[in-house]
Image (cartoon, rainbow, N blue to C red):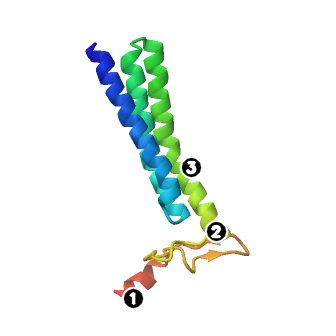
Amino acid sequence: MIIELLASMFLLAGCFFMLVASLGVFRMPDLLTRMHATTKSGVLGAGLIMCAVMLFFTESSVTLKALAVMAFTTLTSPIAAHAIGRAGYFIGVPLWKHTVKDALKGRYDAETHVLKSPDPEADDKKS
């Protein structure tokens, strides 16, 4: 009885975070903030749902598979978001009008597709 209640609480919390992730796709103004909302809330929601699965099904094979899903999503979601964000920036997806700083501006050559590293000497001269 207690295990089912605890599993249902994890499941509801996971579904809540997945709902927050889906709302972030519709409510956020640009690609980068949408990706932030979906990766953070999506990974947490999937992790909580997998915790509920581990609690409800106490078999070791199910627990191992749930842990594998949690590890896979935790490791791959930030990498995928970085790759999508970088590709979106380089093809010219516009940033939000209230974006404060564009750290890559002037460092990417669209013809050669080379991203230049920041010059540490230039940064020392600024300060």
Question: Is the Cβ of the residue at disc 1 closer than 8 Å to that at disc 3?
Answer: no
Q: Of the residues under marks 2 and 3, which one precedes in the sequence?
A: 3
Q: Which residue is mark 1?
A: 125
Q: Which residue is mark 2?
A: 90
Kindly identify the residue that appears in the image at 39 percent across and 29 percent down: 11
Quarter that holds the C terminus: bottom left
* Farthest-out residue, left: 2
Task: Indicate the secondary structure of the residue bearing disc 3.
Answer: helix
Front one among 58 and 74: 58
Q: CA distance from mark 1 to mark 3?
A: 36 Å
Residue 44 visible to the viewer: no
Mark 3: give few (<14), some (14-19) or many (20+) Cα within 10 Å: few
Q: Is residue 106 above or below residue 35?
A: below
Kindly identify the residue that appears in the image at 42 percent across and 77 percent down: 100
Task: Indicate the secondary structure of the residue bearing disc 2.
Answer: helix
Residue 27 visible to the viewer: yes
Q: Find residue 80 and name its label.
A: 3
Determine the image quadrant of residue 46: top left
